[in-house]
Image (cartoon, helix red, strand yellow):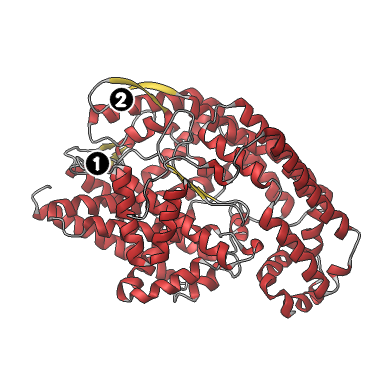
């Protein structure tokens, strides 16, 4: 960190443009359109690439070059998308993004013939391409395309779905997100003063250790969610209907099957994970029972589930946070530390909350040749320290992929994406825990457990909630707001148990949970945490194992998740693997219970 004279704490858009002139960006978009349409004109009239492996290589190399540099919206699309994350009420940015989305759809439709044609190569000819040495770098991509043929519609039908995707789902989801980001309410701050706060700040305040402060924030959130619940009712039903129609057209047998196929993971593996975690909801129930006792209450309110236990006087200013995370990363591997340093120095991290900015945190990358960016909403809590580690874990994953893979393999499957991020979090918590007394160790252990249970049991409960939403919608039709709320409370209560009260208003807290609009994404958090803990244990036994982890992080989509994990000595098809991870979590809760008794806290 000494080599970083000054950290930039806002995104440096100069990494994309020195001067983002609107006319120049429009001209660049026209060039992107031209290059994509030139590719289409060249290959649409030919069929040789579907018959000859060498010609296929030429076509895929050209396709990869476009994907690496401009994709369907290039730098202009990336620029406006990032700008929107910081200012979601800006109508001018939204208008530009809408035009860019339309262009992207136009280009995707123009290129639909290419992947469709490859997918439909007859089974008896596929080995000719899969075994051709010149196509080895595209081998897994080709196999995936061949496998997708059974779910494809005709080219004109695929184009129709592309054209209607925005109105069928995208606009609905954006609408609710936009409504929420506009909201402001007066809530109590830590000094007991009533102050105006934006939606992101209110969300953060519900975790205050001051009960009056967090209850004030909960009242505001309940009011916001109730205000938008009716709109969200229709939004969610539209999303459910869109998914139902898509699955019926494509022939997916169950609501989550398309997610599994997209993630290149066997349904049986995900079912094994979900069943294993659901069978151990007793672990999370014990945790919340312990937390309630430690906080001196009979029951936690729903909004209090993430409240820190213990003293949180220690404020983690961002400079201190960055220094701590840098120390941990560098100790693991010098390149990890160098990547973080580059992000801090070059302005690739937007750090603090502000009005209009998206809530939460993320890491994003677009075309291979464009920079990776991270967004935070740092307020100085311990959780914000692990959030930086989490998002930089994603960033390191992307940077290693960009270096090793071609653009068509430069991506992550859902079930691998969360491994790097949670892997980094655990090492940072180890550093914070190092050398502290037993009282502080209990506090950190409770924080660690809170994160793990939120990522494992809570996400599996959400997955179960999603399954019910889709299944019941398909059998009963439109789900009224009250029914959605009842299902939500049922599944949240299942993993939290009797120690958490489903307080009035909690039935609407699904409104802002964006992941349920992304269709069964959440299982990846549970799998990611358990896999990363296994990797962490391996690194603890042998620091040299980090090099194998780096190789795994650089694989992208060049092999299936099962293959990539198998190279690390992990068989995700073995239910025993998941049960072993849950036993480790069970032991952590037992340790916390025993430590709390030893300290006389319960």
Of 333 and 444, which appears nearest the observer?
A: 333
Of 283 and 52, which appears nearest the observer?
A: 52
Quadrant containing the N terminus is bottom left
Of 62 and 456, which appears nearest the observer?
A: 62
Which quadrant would residue 10 be assigned to in this image? top left
Where residue 558 sits: x, y (%)?
A: 61, 69
> Is 88 drawn above or below residue 401 in the view shown?
above
Which quadrant would residue 479 be assigned to in this image? top right
Where residue 506 sits: x, y (%)?
A: 39, 33
In 3D space, how far apart are the residues under numbered discs 1 and 2 (Cα atoms)? 22 Å
> Is disc 1 surrounded by few (<14), some (14 to 19) or many (20+) residues within 10 Å?
few
Judging by the rendered image, the residue that carries numbered circle 2 is 216
Q: Is residue 185 left or right of residue 598?
A: right
Residue under the image location 33 percent in, 27 percent down? 217
The answer to whether mark 1 and mark 2 are in CB contact below 8 A is no
Residue under the image location 39 percent in, 52 percent down? 455
Point out the tag, 1 or 2, that comes first from the N-terminus. Answer: 2
Where residue 226 sits: x, y (%)?
A: 45, 25
Where residue 21 sits: x, y (%)?
A: 66, 34
> Is 213 drawn above or below residue 311 in the view shown?
above
Judging by the rendered image, the residue that carries numbered circle 1 is 315
| Any part of residue 488 in sight | yes
Residue under the image location 49 percent in, 51 percent down? 522
């Amino acid at each position: 960190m000494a080599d970083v004279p000054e950290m930039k704490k806002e995104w440096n858009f100069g990494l994309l443009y020195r001067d983002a002139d609107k006319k120049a960006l429009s001209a660049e978009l026209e060039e992107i359109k031209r290059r994509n349409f030139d590719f289409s004109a060249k290959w649409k009239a030919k069929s040789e690439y579907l018959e000859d492996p060498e010609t296929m290589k030429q076509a895929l190399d050209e396709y990869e070059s476009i994907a690496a540099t401009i994709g369907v919206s290039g730098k202009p699309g990336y620029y406006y998308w990032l700008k929107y994350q910081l200012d979601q009420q800006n109508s001018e940015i939204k208008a530009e993004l809408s035009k860019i989305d339309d262009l992207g759809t136009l280009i995707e439709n123009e290129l639909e013939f290419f992947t469709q044609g490859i997918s439909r190569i007859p089974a008896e000819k596929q080995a000719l391409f899969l075994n051709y040495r010149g196509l080895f770098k595209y081998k897994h991509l080709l196999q995936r395309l061949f496998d997708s043929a059974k779910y494809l519609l005709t080219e004109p039908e695929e184009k129709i779905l592309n054209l209607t995707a925005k109105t069928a789902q995208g606009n609905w989801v954006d609408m609710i997100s936009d409504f929420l980001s506009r909201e402001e309410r007066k809530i109590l701050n830590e000094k007991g003063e009533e102050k105006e706060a934006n939606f992101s700040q209110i969300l953060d305040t519900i975790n205050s250790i001051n009960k009056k402060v967090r209850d004030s924030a909960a009242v505001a959130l309940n009011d916001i969610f109730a205000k938008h619940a009716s709109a969200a009712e229709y939004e969610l039903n539209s999303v459910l209907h869109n998914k139902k129609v898509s699955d019926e057209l494509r022939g997916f047998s169950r609501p989550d099957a398309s997610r599994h196929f997209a993630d290149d993971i066997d349904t049986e593996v995900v079912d094994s994970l979900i069943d294993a975690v659901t069978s151990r909801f007793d672990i999370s129930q014990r945790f919340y029972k312990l937390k309630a006792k430690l906080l001196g209450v009979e029951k936690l309110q729903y909004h209090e589930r993430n409240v820190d236990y213990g003293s949180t006087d220690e404020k983690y200013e961002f400079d201190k946070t960055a220094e701590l995370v840098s120390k941990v990363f560098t100790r693991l591997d010098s390149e990890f530390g160098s990547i973080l340093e580059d992000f801090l120095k070059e302005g690739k991290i937007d750090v603090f909350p502000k009005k209009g900015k998206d809530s939460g945190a993320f890491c994003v990358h677009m075309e291979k040749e464009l920079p990776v960016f991270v967004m935070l909403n740092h307020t100085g809590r311990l959780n914000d320290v692990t959030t930086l580690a989490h998002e930089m874990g994603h960033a390191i994953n992307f940077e290693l992929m960009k270096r090793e893979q071609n653009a068509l393999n430069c991506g992550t499957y859902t079930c691998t994406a969360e491994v790097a991020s949670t892997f980094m979090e655990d090492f940072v918590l180890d550093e914070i825990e190092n050398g502290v007394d037993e009282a502080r160790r209990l506090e950190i252990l409770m924080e660690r457990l809170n994160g793990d249970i939120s990522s494992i049991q809570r996400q599996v409960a959400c997955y179960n909630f999603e399954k019910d939403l889709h299944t019941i919608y398909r059998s009963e039709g439109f789900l009224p707001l009250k029914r959605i709320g009842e299902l939500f409370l049922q599944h949240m209560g299942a993993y939290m148990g009797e120690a958490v009260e489903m307080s009035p208003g909690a039935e609407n807290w699904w409104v802002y949970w964006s992941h349920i609009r992304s269709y069964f994404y959440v299982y990846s958090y549970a799998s990611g945490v358990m896999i990363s803990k296994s990797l962490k244990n391996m690194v603890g036994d042998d620091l040299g194992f980090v090099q194998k982890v780096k190789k795994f992080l650089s694989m992208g989509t060049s092999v299936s998740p099962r293959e990539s994990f198998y190279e690390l000595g992990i068989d995700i098809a073995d239910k025993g693997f998941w049960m072993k991870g849950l036993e480790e979590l069970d032991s952590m809760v037992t340790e916390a219970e025993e430590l709390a008794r030893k300290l006389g806290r319960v």
